[in-house]
Image (cartoon, rainbow, N blue to C red):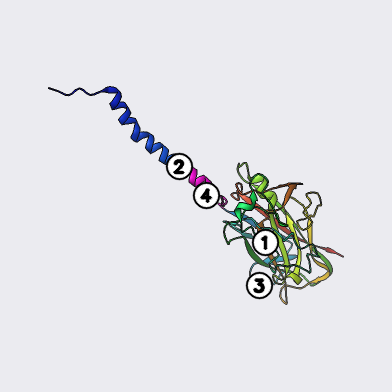
């Protein structure tokens, strides 16, 4: 006799493997979302230029090879300037003069305890430091540029740096990431005695970091000399990073542990010389 199959029992036994598969996929997706707190760094670009009568390059030999005066801007482009970078911040625990008295030689500090970060504000739940989650050792990238005059030595000059930026494409977190994109400037080499200042796209003073004090330029030289490129040059180091503690409001950072999107972000640094 042919055995009858219970349709209800057959349906249940057929559905159970499908449910198990769906649950497994859901658990895998949840785990990925929980662990994926690093940024979506498809690449940040940084372009550096000077105003006419000066030349800039990332190669000191190339800059000295130019023999004729020029009125053109020279632009150096760095691609993926902050790819795979995690947020960092200046040490807020050191309230002394930041330009000459840093506790940390790099001038930056990083979160080492993710559990102590409030993901809604991007700030630490306790302690004197406040900045967003950083869970890798890759926090910043340094770029060195060489600046000189192309016509004749320029004396009694104020040389300043300004920062602007743009986003190509859409992204809910790109505006905040762009605002927190920051550059520390050093004259000659990265050392606290050579620190010139910090610029961020938000136009705020990162060292005061009170969400209201503005800072829009850094003075590289004050009443100084910009040498002729065939004889010498000025060396500027730019430390590029995402300021995880830069305050958007009194108790809210631009960046929190769930949102960093560096893709299609471009930073533009312009060095301008003017008579003192």
In the image, farthest residue toward the right: 276
Circle 2 Cα neighbour tier, 10 Å, few/some/many (<14 / 14–19 / ≥20): few
Closer to viewer: mark 4 or mark 3: 4
Q: Marks 1/4: CA distance?
A: 22 Å
- Left or right side of 12 for 240: right
Q: Could you say which disc has been placed on residue 60 in the image?
A: 3
Measuring from the top left, give residue 65's x and y in whole percent.
Answer: 66, 73
Measuring from the top left, give residue 59's x and y in whole percent.
Answer: 63, 70
Q: Is residue 159 above or below residue 25?
A: below
Q: Is residue 263 above or below residue 189?
A: above
Q: Secondary structure at mark 4?
A: helix
Circle 4 Cα neighbour tier, 10 Å, few/some/many (<14 / 14–19 / ≥20): few
Q: Could you say which disc has been placed on residue 35 in the image?
A: 4
Q: Are marks 2 and 3 in contact (CB under 8 Å)?
A: no
Closer to viewer: mark 1 or mark 3: 1
In the image, 196 versus 169, the foreground residue is 196
Q: Residue at x 49, y 46 (%)?
A: 32
Measuring from the top left, give residue 41's x and y in whole percent.
Answer: 57, 52
Please tell me whether residue 33 belongs to the stretch shown in magenta: yes
Q: Marks 1/2: CA distance?
A: 34 Å
Closer to viewer: mark 1 or mark 2: 2
Please tell me whether residue 262 belongs to the stretch shown in magenta: no
Please provide the residue range marked out in magenta. 28-42
Q: Is residue 43 visible?
A: yes
- Quick one: quadrant of the C terminus? bottom right
First-in-chain label (4 vs 2): 2
| Residue to which mark 1 is pinned | 109
In the image, farthest residue toward the bottom: 231
Q: Could you say which disc has been placed on residue 27 in the image?
A: 2
Q: Are marks 4 and 2 in contact (CB under 8 Å)?
A: no
């Amino acid at each position: 006799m042919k055995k009858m199959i219970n349709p209800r029992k057959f349906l249940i036994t057929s559905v159970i493997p499908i449910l198990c598969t769906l649950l497994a996929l859901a658990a895998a997706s949840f785990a990925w979302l929980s662990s994926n707190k690093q940024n979506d760094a498809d690449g940040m670009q940084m372009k550096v230029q000077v105003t006419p009568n000066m030349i800039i390059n990332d190669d000191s030999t190339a800059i000295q090879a130019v023999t004729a005066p020029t009125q053109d801007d020279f632009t150096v482009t760095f691609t993926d300037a902050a790819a795979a970078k995690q947020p960092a911040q200046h040490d807020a625990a050191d309230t002394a003069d930041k330009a000459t008295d840093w506790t940390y030689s790099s001038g930056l500090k990083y979160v080492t305890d993710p559990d102590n970060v409030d993901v809604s504000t991007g700030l630490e739940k306790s302690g004197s430091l406040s900045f967003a989650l950083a869970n890798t050792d890759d926090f910043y990238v340094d770029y060195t540029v060489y600046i000189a005059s192309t016509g004749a030595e320029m004396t009694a000059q104020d040389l300043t740096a300004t920062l602007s930026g743009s986003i190509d494409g859409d992204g809910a977190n790109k505006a905040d990431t762009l605002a927190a994109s920051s550059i520390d400037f050093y004259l000659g080499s990265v050392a606290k005695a050579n620190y010139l200042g910090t610029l961020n796209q938000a136009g705020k003073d990162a060292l005061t970091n009170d969400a209201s004090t503005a800072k829009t330029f850094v003075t590289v030289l004050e009443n100084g000399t910009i040498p002729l490129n065939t004889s010498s040059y000025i060396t500027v180091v730019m430390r590029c990073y995402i300021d995880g503690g830069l305050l958007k409001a009194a108790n809210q950072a631009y960046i929190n542990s769930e949102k960093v999107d560096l893709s299609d972000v471009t930073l533009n640094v312009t060095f301008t010389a003017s008579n003192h």
